[in-house]
Image (cartoon, helix red, strand yellow):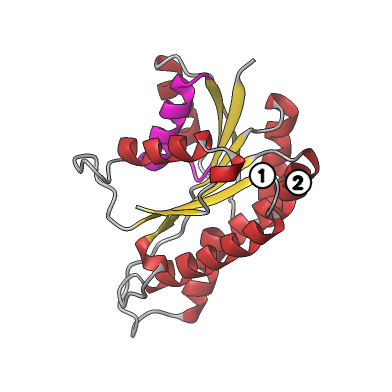
Amino acid sequence: MKKLITILGAGPGISQAVAEKFGHENFKVALIARTEQKLQHQVMQLAKKGIEASYAVADVGNEADLKKALLQIKDNEGHAAVILYNAAAVSVMDILDQTWETISNEMNTTVGGYFNLMKTVLPFCLNENKGKLFVTNGGFALAGDDQWTSLSVGKAALRNVVQAFQKKAIGTNVHIAQLTITGFVNEKDVVYSPKAIAEQYWKLYQQQPENFDAEIIY
């Protein structure tokens, strides 16, 4: 029986590459994002590559939306062996022109969705003593930026929240990890191409409890 990977923040780039990598490793894929048409297109693309995929529509920054999508996937596909949180909201603007309202609203997606995801799935994973719960983070989590302020603030908060949840899983077989990507994702970049990043997630997936990485700074 195929295992399931659920990817939140589905779309082109990293999530597509991760879906293809795990799909080719005999996983089925469930996708969550806001736009149904784009999800349908992504499922069709994966099907052409022989990968079984489904989707649920949700704004992951909305707690009720997110929980409804997760329940839909669980009812239709079963529990996921791997969950990847790959969602973020971005607005590029000089910090002197930025507003706290924008930063706050975008944090609902960048970090709030992850927080609500983990509150929903982690108790089950701890009870079953299994689960791979991964999140995409970025170099802006390590240093603020005066143009990408909303993203850097959100990613820094995300990194902190991931570390907090990791403390709940100490001594268990539940693997909570973040991949902190310190370069700009580019198809032509050998290191930072989506395919190369997907390989890092596969590396995390293969790790055993005694060798779990909490974070890969890549």
Q: Is residue 150 above or below residue 63?
A: below
Decide which of 1, 55 is in the foreground and name it.
1
Determine which of the numbered discs, if any, sits on residue 126 in the image: 2
Q: Give the alpha-carbon distance from disc 1 to disc 2, as whole Å.
A: 7 Å
Q: Residues within 10 Å of mark 2 (few under 14, many from 20)?
A: some
Badges 1 and 2: C-beta atoms under 8 Å apart?
Answer: yes
Where residue 58 sits in the image (x, y, percent)?
A: 60, 45
**The N terminus: image quadrant:** top right
Q: Is residue 191 above or below residue 44?
A: below
Q: Residue at x 48, y 48 (%)?
A: 86
Residue at disc 1, secondary structure: loop
Residue at disc 2, secondary structure: helix
Q: Is residue 167 above or below residue 152?
A: above
**The disc labelled 2 sits on which kind of residue?**
Leu
In the rendered image, the residue lying farthest to the bottom is 96
Examine the rendering and report whether any part of residue 152 can be seen.
Answer: yes
Determine which of the numbered discs, if any, sits on residue 217 in the image: none
Give the residue number, with chain letter if any, for mark 1: 174
Q: Residue at x 58, y 63 (%)?
A: 163
Where residue 70 sits in the image (x, y, percent)?
A: 68, 40
Decide which of 206, 199 is in the foreground and name it.
206
Q: Is residue 182 magenta?
A: no
Where residue 110 sits in the image (x, y, percent)?
A: 51, 60
Label count reads 2
Q: Is residue 11 left or right of residue 186?
A: right
Q: Residues within 10 Å of mark 1 (few under 14, many from 20)?
A: many
Q: Which residues are magenta?
A: 8-26
Decide which of 189, 46 is in the foreground and name it.
189
Sequence-wise, the earlier of marks 1 and 2 is 2
In the rendered image, the residue lying farthest to the left is 188
